[in-house]
Structures are given as structure tokens and as C-alpha cells.
Image (cartoon, grey):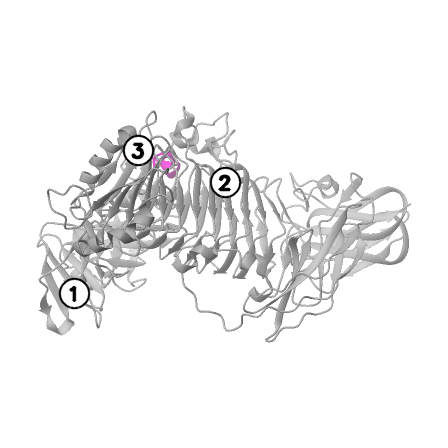
Amino acid sequence: MPRLPWRALTALTGLLLPWFAGPAAATPITTTLYVAPTGGSHGSGTLTRPFSTLEQARDQVRKLTRNQRSDIRVVLLPGDHRRTDTFRLTAADSGRNGHEVVYQALPGTKATINGGRTVTDWQLSDPAKNIYKAHVGAIDFRQLSVNGERQQRARGPENPPGFSKTSTGYTDTTQSMVGWKNQGDLEVNSRWGWMHYRCPVQSASGTTVTMQQPCFANANLHQGYEIQNPTWIENAYELLDSPGEWYLDKPSGDLFYSPKPGQDLRTATVPLVQDLVNVTGTLTDPVRDVRFDGITFAYSTWLAPSSDDGVVEGQAGFRIVGTGHPDFDETRPHWQKTPGAVNVGYSRDVAFTNSTFTHLGAVGLNLNTGAQGTVVRGNIVRDVAATGIQVGGTDVVDHHPDDVRAITKDTLVSNNLITKAAADYSGSLAILAGYTEHTVIEHNEIRDLPYSGISIGWGWGLTDQGGNPAYPGNAGIPVSPTPTTAKNNVVRDNAISDIMKNQADGGGIYTLGAQPGSVVSGNYIRKTPGPAYGAIYHDEGSKGFTTTGNALCEVAERWIFLNHALGIDARRNFTSTPVFLAQAGTVDSTIADNTVVPGCEQLPASIVNTAGLEPAYQHLDPQPVPGDRVAPTKPGKPTVTTSFPMVADVSWPSATDAVGVTGYTVFLDGRPVSASDGLSARVTGLQTGRRYTFSVSARDAAGNESGRSVSVGVTMPAAVNLALGKQVTVSSYSEPNVPALAVDGKLSTRWAQGLGLPDPSWIQVDLGALYDVSGAVTTFELPRGYQYKLEVSPDGDDWTLFEDHTREATTQPDNYASAPGVVRARYLRLTVTGSSGNGGSIYELRIYGGS
């Protein structure tokens, strides 16, 4: 439907009846109120005499809900519903008796809750530089959009020369800023690790650049991660030298802009309202059953970064503010959360569906303390200055509330397109969840970000039960005897790509803190460059996650990174890089039975095609129709052999495809467990004596997947790990990684040689009696870089070479050695002849055979 003036819509009343009325006379008819951007001051809320403000409609809804018997819809007619202040809903504006109050756009039209102002009366100010000027008066803003696109506030080049940091600012040997106007509005931007610092300049005189306080002092609190030399300098007329750049001269009230070719200056818009919408109840009286559907939220501002506090990040865009902080750790409990253009708190069953969040100066949608049962589904979040969607808080009331009604829980964030978030504050994210219970983040399409995609959890273990002993004094945070509220969170079936473009130390999915019962599964993550420490990154204190069934490719560094994580179970994932790391301090965690494939085109199509927007929401992100839409034929009937009791080797006759088969997926009892670009694959992590069913599918480059082959059932042979719990001797060891941990049956504990000792190192198992040894499985700490040999002996004196892996280094953590025949032995010794600097380190050494 084309966009029409509201008066022209009166002719459409008949078309609206099926939408607003129920299917039968017995069904209560939905009450409908209308609001027009240009409605008369005496409107009654009908289509012909609509209200002129949202507040008029809200106040009428309050009257109607006193005895509500059906849903009430407030229909925003097409156009810009301009705001000069916040539209507020409280518990008084709730739906009643199980019915909703819905604020929505007329289907097929665009209605915008708009906090911006159009800039007019442009005049050519500097013909030589093509700079135009418009007088805007005594207003302030940090964003400008033209033709619906964000433009760049005037900034200098990357990494300007001549700067060196001092205790109060910088020495600038180029004296580049001397004489510039409005020096107090200048900002030094400095990117460091996961943080984006924005600190204002106080003055520039000679070679001395003095920075404003407390920003600069706070930016130097985090030892080893302090603000550095400028990455760039921003917000000066003197820097306005490229098309698309703008500058606001606040003392004069003049806005300067150098337009790009083809831009229409009549579309220039600046944001003036911070909170467009606020839906907040109280602990005892939450706002309930309110939904926003099909509405565009656009043009909000956030001016706190322009204060003398600037932007000093702790994490995820949260700011350190104020004076008198003795050290970085002291600030942790006081970091300020970034506000949203739309904010919700102390609520029940509030929803945002089919809406758009764009041109926003801080967070897009912010769910605060006590938001429960929130649904965020089918929305577009694009061009947001900070985090796209923010769920829950990080304060004491969030992690250890006195009342369960304050818990942020049962949130669904599903089928949203989030792109170009963190546009101004690049340490922010697409989706952030703090301390939450049962937050489900699923089927979102996330891409084009300066930092991480999804971050869930908080606290670095400091607020968890017992605190984090790795931090002296628990970083000054009181040690809690009870768990936090974080648990049962789910991150599944999201498609995440093209991230970490500007910051470091993050990942596609990033976690913090204990979250028992939580799951990371079915996500498709691609294009993660080197600054991403892990495509999946379980950081400090992360605990209680099952990470499984994820598909990752084009990963520059590690597919998974565990840093002081606890109790992580990462199995049955698929990756094009074998590299992972469980950093020192990681305990009780398992990374096993994962499959390495050559590239994206070998990942299981069942995972790749399921991740991201579901079919009903793919219109949010239209993609070109693939030229190849024909799936390969089914592979032939597989053959399964079981040389080891926990390993099945599967092979199959090839499938055919009109273009070409690129890969195969092996299914175990209907679940994808291995993949290959050839006609065979190994499935590990099986249980002895258990019967499994195997089948295989084929895929092509376009992601078309064949049907599955005939299934084959196999019972794994019974066997006993002869090394389990037996006596171990070693060349050396380092606490707490003692020798017995290599034969304790756990893939989360390990033996490691003495710290700093050179290769070789060795570990020897005494089986306690003579056995016919048929095979051994060695699981190294890291997936690659070990050269080793296995020897067996009947008496500990005469040794026979069992496996020689000294000529090439390992490329997988699990390594299998089979005896060429019957080998009678009591002792087995593994010698690490080369470790690529890793040092000998083995999670488990398993030995199989019979008496």
C-alpha cells in the first residue's frame, strides 16, 4: 500500500474491518483508536477525526481498560510522529484481563516515532570546500543524517603523527590543534583492545595538549589497558575536509556540512530527544501486556559522551564516570549502563514486533531491571550508535535481588536483523544480555560490527557464588555465598558474520560468569578476523555452558577460546580451523569430538541453512535468489567400521550434483556429528556397547542438501580403558596438572610437564599386568604442534616402538594409534619429542586391549 495522507485513508475503512474485527459475532471486536501526525487538536480517535498525539490516545486507552474485554489497538497513521519529549507508559497503561494494548502502524505504511528535527535554510558557506551552513540555534547533537544515512562528524586521519602521552594529556610536536576554535569540543578517540575511549580536549597550546578531567584520569585507571595516543581526533571545523563530514559550532549555533554528490540537504535531520519511548512500571505494579508492532523508532540522541566524563569503557559500552577512583577495580560496581531510545523495565509480557530501530544515538532497545516475558521478534536494528538490543542490567539488584520480581527473565530475542550497530561507540555490540534468567537469543541475522556479535553474562566470576579467587580480594567486590540470577540462557541458530572490524578481544558469541543450564548451539559464525580471540569466546568465570552443533568458517584465529572458564562442555561443533585454546585457569571443561572441515562449503547444510532468519522473516534481509536450487542426489548406503570402541569410521558411495558436491554430513541417530569433503569421515566420542544409527547427506556450494542415505545400525564393541586410574610416572609436572589427571577418564583435566622445561618430556603408565595392547588414544591439550612417540614394554626395561609421530606434528587433539598385531605389554610410555613451545600437556591417555 502506498503512503497516503491520513484523510485519504478514510476510504479504506472497509478494507480494515477484517483485520480489526473477529471472525464471528461472538468474538469481542477489537477497539481501535487512530493517531495522525497532523491530526486536529480536537480529534476523537476515529479514522476520520484521529488524535494528534500519542498521549491523547494513551489517556483514552486508560479509560477503556477499566473494564477491558478485548484487545485495544492504537493505530499510528503514516508519517512522522514528532517527539519533543519522551512518550511514557506506566502500569496505568497496561492491558487488562488477559488482553493487549497494541501500538502499531497501519499495515503496509510507515509510521515513525521521530525524535529528530529537519535542518533547513542551508546556505553555501565556503565554495572552495563545498561547505554549506545552516543556523540551528542553541541545540546540541552528536549525529546527522542526510538522505537517511548517517554522516561522519568531522575527523582527522587515523593515527596522527607527533603525539606522545603525558600525565595530563599529550605532547603534540606538530602543534596541529593550536589556534583551532572551540577546543573544548574536540575529542580524542583511542581504540584499545575491546574499549573505545572518547575523551574531550581542554586546550591545545604550543606542543601541550591538556585533556579534560575526569575523563582522562579515568581512562588511565586500567593498568595495561590505558588510553593510548589518538587513533583519530574528532569534532573541529578545521577537520571538515571531506564530503559527508559535518561540524556543529555550538557557540554560534551554526551547523556546517560538506554534502556528498547527489544528496538532498532538505533531508538533513538531527536528533534532539534521548528517550523516545519509556515503558516502565514498578516492582509492585509492573506495566503489562503492551505491544509495539510495525513502528519505526528513529532519531534519538545521547549527550552524556559530550560531558567531561566522555566515554571511558569498562565493557560493552558501559562507562566509568565521576572522580576520586583509586583504581580500576573500584569502579566495576559503578559502571553506567548506556540508555536506550526505547526503554522497558519492571514489566510483564511487553513485545516489540515487526518494527525498525534506526538513526539512534545510544542503545536501540534497552530492557532494564524487572522486565519479564519480553518478546523482541521480527525487527530491523540498523544504524545505532551503541548496542542494538540490551537485555537486563548489571547492578546488585540484577545479580542478587532482594525480590524475584526484579529478575530480568523469560526474554525472547528472535528473528531480528541487526547490522551497523555500535556505529559511534565501537566497544558496543549487536545484542547484550547482563544478569538474566532464561533469555533466548535465536535466529537473528547479525553482521557488520566493530566488535562482538552477542555477549551474554557479566561479572568475570566476581559476583558468582564464592567470587573469583584469581582476583586478589575479589577486586573489592563482596564475595557472595549464593549464585547470581543468571541461568538457563540459550543462544541458538543465529547467523553472525563480518564482526570485530575495529576492536579486539571479543568474538561472535562472548560469555561471562556462571550461567548453569545455558546452551550455545546451532549458530553459524563466519568472517571473524584476527582481533577476535575466539569465534566462540567463553571468558572469565563462564560456567555451565553446553556449546554444541555450531558451524564456524573463515575464522582467522581460534574457533573457540576458553579463558579462566569453568565447566564448559564443547562437543560436536564444526569448524574450518582446528585451532582452539583453553587458557591457563580453565578447569573442568571439555573440548572434544569436534569436526574440522576444509571450508564453509563443507559445513553441514542443516546447520548453516537453519541459522539466521526463519522463512517467515527472511523478507527483512532479502538475498539474491541462488542460481543453483537443485539438491544433490542421496549418497549411497554407508559402511561403518569400529577399530576403536569410541570411534566409528564411516564411508559411503558418492552422490551426484548438476554443479558439484562440495561436502557430506554424517548423522548419528539423526543429529549431525561429522562432515567431510570426501567419501569418509570419523565419528568420535561414542560409548562402548551402545547401538547407533548412521546416515549421510550431501550438499553443494549453494547450500542445497540432499536427502539422507539409507541408515546403517552398528553396535560399538565393548572395551575397557586399561589405563584408567593406573599408576603413572612422568619426567616432570606442574601443579595443579599432576600425572594422575592424564588417566582419570576426564577430558577436562590434564597432566602438564614442569613449567619452562624444554622438550622432550614423557609420561609412562603401568597397567599392573601383561595385556594384549591393541590401540591407544592420546588427547593433547592443544589441537596441533605435538611430535611424539609411543613405546610399549613387558617389563619396563625392553621397549618396542608402538607409534612413531615424530616426523610431523599433530593437527587434531585426539590421536589414534593401532597395533599392527598383538603386542604384549605392561607399560606404555609416550614421549613428546617436540611441542612447538606448548610443553608436554595431555588431557587423557587411553589404552585398549585384552588380557
Magenta-span inclusion, residue 43: no
Which is more toward the observer, 447 or 582?
Answer: 447
* Tag 3: amino acid: Ser
For mark 1, give the secondary structure.
helix
The region drawn magenta spans 324-335
Q: Which mark is residue 94?
A: 3
For mark 3, give the secondary structure.
loop
Magenta-span inclusion, residue 328: yes
**Residue 738 found in image quarter:** top right
- Between marks 2 and 1, how big is the CA–CA gap? 46 Å
Q: Earlier in the sequence, mark 3 or mark 2?
A: 3
- Between marks 3 and 1, how big is the CA–CA gap? 41 Å
Instruction: Name the residue: 51% across, 34% down.
Output: 468
Residue 820: x percent and y percent? 87, 60
Say if mark 2 contacts mark 1, CB within 8 Å.
no
- Between marks 3 and 2, how big is the CA–CA gap? 27 Å
Q: Residues within 10 Å of mark 1 (few under 14, many from 20)?
A: some
Instruction: Name the residue: 21% across, 40% down.
Output: 57
For mark 2, give the secondary structure.
loop
Say if mark 3 contacts mark 1, CB within 8 Å.
no
**Residue 46 found in image quarter:** top left
Q: Which mark is residue 489?
A: 2
Residue 501: x percent and y percent? 41, 60
Instruction: Name the residue: 90% across, 48% down.
Output: 794
Closest to the camera, between mark 3 and mark 2, is 3
Q: Earlier in the sequence, mark 2 or mark 1?
A: 1
Residue for badge 1? 265
Q: Residues within 10 Å of mark 2 (few under 14, many from 20)?
A: many
